[in-house]
Amino acid sequence: MRFNLVDRIHEWEPGKRLTASKLLTNGEEYLADHFPTFPVMPGVMMLQAVVEASAWLWRVSTEFRHTVVVLREAKNVKYGTFMQPGHTLELLTEMVKSDDTTATFKCKGNVKGGGATVNAQIVLSGYNVETRGQTTEDMLSRHWQERWSWLTASHGNSGAKN
């Protein structure tokens, strides 16, 4: 599954701030399960929306230097009102500090015309696969081998069937 939780970027000032939005529709795949009789955007998706907005701010601020941007840390996450289909999630992110590989942001999400949905301070990490001395294939192979180890850790070799 892949979700794009920023529909539009409205304003930005590189190195400082960015505003964006997400219109929540009934067509969002995750709403079928969260919750069937009272669909609302899950809190983790609201957090991901501010992460995506922050990643866009960092990308434009660094002239797209990092090909991979990931969430490293989320602190002081607070949730407010529900985000229901038909409403727009307004996102504001402000860059607090950054260096070559990390950036810290203060983020807010609000229901347009309503209250706060999410507030957080996040840290993003950025890198390029080539700068780590790896090919994409090497990186993916190592990822899947590590994932296999995590998934089979309690079984050792006893789970193998010939």
Image (cartoon, rainbow, N blue to C red):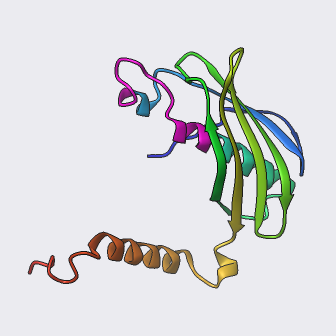
Q: Which residues are magenta?
A: 32-48
Say whether residue 62 is visible: no
Please tell me how many numbered marks the rendered image carries. Answer: 0
Where does the image place residue 54, in percent across and percent down from the top left? 74, 47
Residue that appears at 43% across and 46% down: 1
Left or right position of 58 against 114: right
Q: Nearer the viewer, residue 74 or 133?
A: 74
Q: In the rendered view, would you say 79 is above or below 17?
A: above
Residue that appears at 69% across and 69% down: 127
Q: Nearer the viewer, residue 44 or 59?
A: 44
Q: State yes or no: residue 109 in magenta.
A: no
Where does the image place residue 43, in percent across and percent down from the top left? 53, 37
Say whether residue 40 is visible: yes
Q: Nearer the viewer, residue 58 or 133?
A: 58
Q: State yes or no: residue 39 in magenta.
A: yes
Where does the image place residue 154, in percent across and percent down from the top left? 25, 75
Where does the image place residue 18, in percent across and percent down from the top left? 82, 40
Displayed quadrant of residue 119: top right
**Which of the image's four quarters has the C terminus?**
bottom left
Residue that appears at 79% across and 48% down: 57
Left or right position of 26 against 99: left
Residue that appears at 42% across and 28% down: 31
The single residue placed furthest to the left in the displayed view is 162
Q: In the rendered view, would you say 41 is above or below 73?
A: above
Q: In the rendered view, would you say 71 is above or below 133?
A: above
Displayed quadrant of residue 101: bottom right
